[in-house]
Amino acid sequence: MTIEELFCETCGAANPPSARFCQNCASPLPVTQITGALPEQTLLIGRYQLVSRIGQGGMGAVYKASDTRLDDRLVAIKEMSKAGMPAARLEEAEASFEREARLLGKLLHPNLPRIHDHFTENDRSYLVMDFIDGETLEEYLDNRGHGPLPVEQVLNWAEQLCDVLSYLHNHQPPIIFRDLKPANVMISESGHIFLIDFGIARIFKPGQSHDTVALGSPGYAAPEQYGKAQSTPRSDIYSLGALIHCLLTGDDPSERPFFFRPASQANPAVPPGLEALLQRMLEMDAERRPTSAQEVLQALRGDDAKLQGQVGLSAQQAKSASRLGYSYGATNAAPSGVDLLLEEAQTLYAQKRLGEAEKVYTQALQLNNTNPLGWQGRGLTQGLLSRHTEALSSFDRALQLDPSLVISWNGKGTALSTLQRNQDALAAFDRALKLEPNNASSWNGKGAVLNALGRPKEALDAFDMALRFDPHMAQAWNNKGLVLRQQKRYQEALSAFDLALTYDRNIATSWSGKASMLHEMGRMQEALDCYQQACIHNPLLVSAWNGKGAVLYDMGRYKEALQAFQEALKLDKNYAPACYGIGNVYYIQQKMKLALEMFDRALRCDSHYAKAWNRRGNVLHDMGERVEALRSFDQALRIDPRFASAWNGKAGVYAHLERYSEALHAYENALRINPNFAQAWNGQGNTFYHLNNYSQALASYNRAVKLNPQMASAWHNLSLVLKKLKRNKEALDASEQAIQLAPNDPDNWTRKAEALQEFAPLQRRKEC
């Protein structure tokens, strides 16, 4: 996504970034960019962390960022600065930005990015929207040398643009985009088109005779956009014609605005029908252009058979056409050919040969792109291939053609849920249930979304409805188990997971969910057995290998734990929990340098992994890097201020640096969060001991050993403070407890010897 134009303060026209004078009115252009200066890793409103700047222009900048509240989902953030703007330009820029926020917030179309948020911070306004992984058509043309593109490729893009323009123009009130050009169209690797940058889009006002200012880009903007008349949907049709002409011919319309040679002169493959359509779209008189984008779309689709016959077929298309007895040159499709392709695609889908299935669905849609079942099948296939954005687009096309397809509504809901658009997903599942109230899959999907929205009670009700209509639905039992586990209703959750496995022994997520819960309950061997089953039924389930490693680690089987974590990383090299798990194994083995490397790797994968920051602090503390350790603990606490272990680690560093008051404050925070944190009580006792406050130290040590009678260091410290308080018999008893727990620690024997030296003479005096 790029923003490259400079906007004239006098007339508002867009200009190339290198221009110093407006190409429309010749006024001087601003030369100082006042946006795009934020460094990487900047955190906006405590939520959006910038990754890189991906666009810069006169009115704004665009950054790639991660949403730290939604699993680091990538988003695009558009920035507009108010600093240093003249009053006239400030008013226009603010209005443009607010207009974009309002427009996108109301729109829902597969060829438009969705807006998620907008806010103001440090005298700048920001708009948060979908991050589109692709390139603009301008970049695409630059990379391939601005030559003519294949006709069928341009037609595919043109049909998508017609579809989205028709959606905008039929909005109430109609929305005129007014800046359609290569820089404002993005294309994904799959060829999916997105219309971007609504900075100068406006709501059409009926009855207004002309636009207030001239807007648009030279060569692509219709004549009426230069202040001569009111822009209408036909203004966008002109711009679309200019864009199609540019793609088909390689001619840059900005070099000679309003002059377009016949497209077939530059590209002989352009058929007469398309050339005639372009001439109509590029009429100077708006009344002589097609009346709507839908009319253009119908014209393009109506000529598809003739156009395809002239541009030729790919080898694979030709092979399929020959096999099915279908002629691409025919003006009417042969339904039997499409039906056979759809049947073949469905068979491949059922056999989980997903790549082949998608290709055949695509072939069927090339023959007839108005078949909703073809789009539905393609969407289901793309969903299983984890290409959820493309799946969403396919389901939307299916539903535009047939809004009664319950499977497509369910597929759309699943895709939206996976893309973290949970409110939209809920609406999709509700639409499916309105059509078919007893659809178990719809209830199950709705339950999953409700849980993601933090509404677990409603989620459980939805899962129960799913199971009412299909008591053997393993996925619903599994999902119900996950919610019950979150609520710590362990016995009910176990029953739900067991029922899921009764109806589908191969459902790896049920084995994994059951294992995770058993791990929490301390039933280690059972947890390990369940993780083993998960890995058997789905050896590619990363979370199962990682969970297995965590259980083996807790069981002290470090070599096996390391192997399990490494299996997880083989499947996903950026899986932070597995890096963290390996770091823990190295830490327990006192391989500090290796441990630090793994925690750093975990944080490169997920910079908001508080547990990794905390453990990194532990390692650095043990390595004597106190200041860096404090930074790590502070980073963990910025992410999670209620992370008791990080407060405890921070307190330990302060105590080592003899900053005892700060240490006590940190220990108090840890114990306020977790009053049963034995290690923090022990550390607090050490701090009081160093301050010669032995009575307080004694109270802290006593609390530590009460909470964890197996903590040898707390018994050792208790013996030490009891000796200071001349309570020698108790000191002797405490030292013996420490020796019993850690007989190989010479310090424990030293404490006993000291206690005996004090206790024995006193005992002899008493006997005398």
Image (spheres, rainbow, N blue to C red):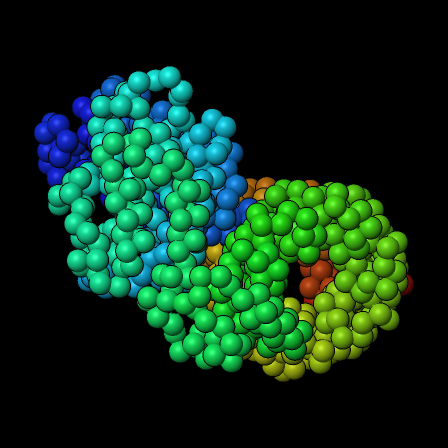
Instruction: Where is residue 358? Give x, y as percent.
Output: 54, 69
Instruction: Where is residue 662? Give x, y as percent.
Output: 54, 43
Asked if one can make out residue 48 in the rendered structure from this viewpoint, the answer is: no
Instruction: Please report the residue visible at 25 percent of the width from the left and 35 percent of the height from the top.
Output: 222
Instruction: Please report the residue visible at 10 percent of the width from the left and 29 percent of the height from the top.
Output: 26
Instruction: Where is residue 333? Give x, y as percent.
Output: 51, 63
Instruction: Where is residue 242? Give x, y as percent.
Output: 25, 45
Asked if one can make out residue 14 in the rendered structure from this viewpoint, the answer is: yes
| Relative horizontal placement of residue 650, taking residue 414 as reference (left or right) | left
Instruction: Please report the residue visible at 25 percent of the width from the left and 41 percent of the height from the top.
Output: 282
Instruction: Please report the residue visible at 40 percent of the width from the left and 21 percent of the height from the top.
Output: 205
When the figure is inspected, residue 154 is found, relative to residue 586, above or below; the finding is above
Which of 97 and 14 lies nearest the eye of the viewer? 14
**Image quadrant in which you'd find residue 505:** bottom right
Q: How many marks?
A: 0
When the figure is inspected, residue 361 is found, relative to residue 179, above or below; the finding is below
When the figure is inspected, residue 41 is found, relative to residue 204, above or below; the finding is below
Which of 329 and 28 lies nearest the eye of the viewer? 329
| Relative horizontal placement of residue 689, taking residue 248 as reference (left or right) | right
Quadrant (top left, top right, bottom left, bottom right) of the C terminus: bottom right
| Relative horizontal placement of residue 328, taking residue 443 as reference (left or right) | left
Which of 56 and 353 lies nearest the eye of the viewer? 353
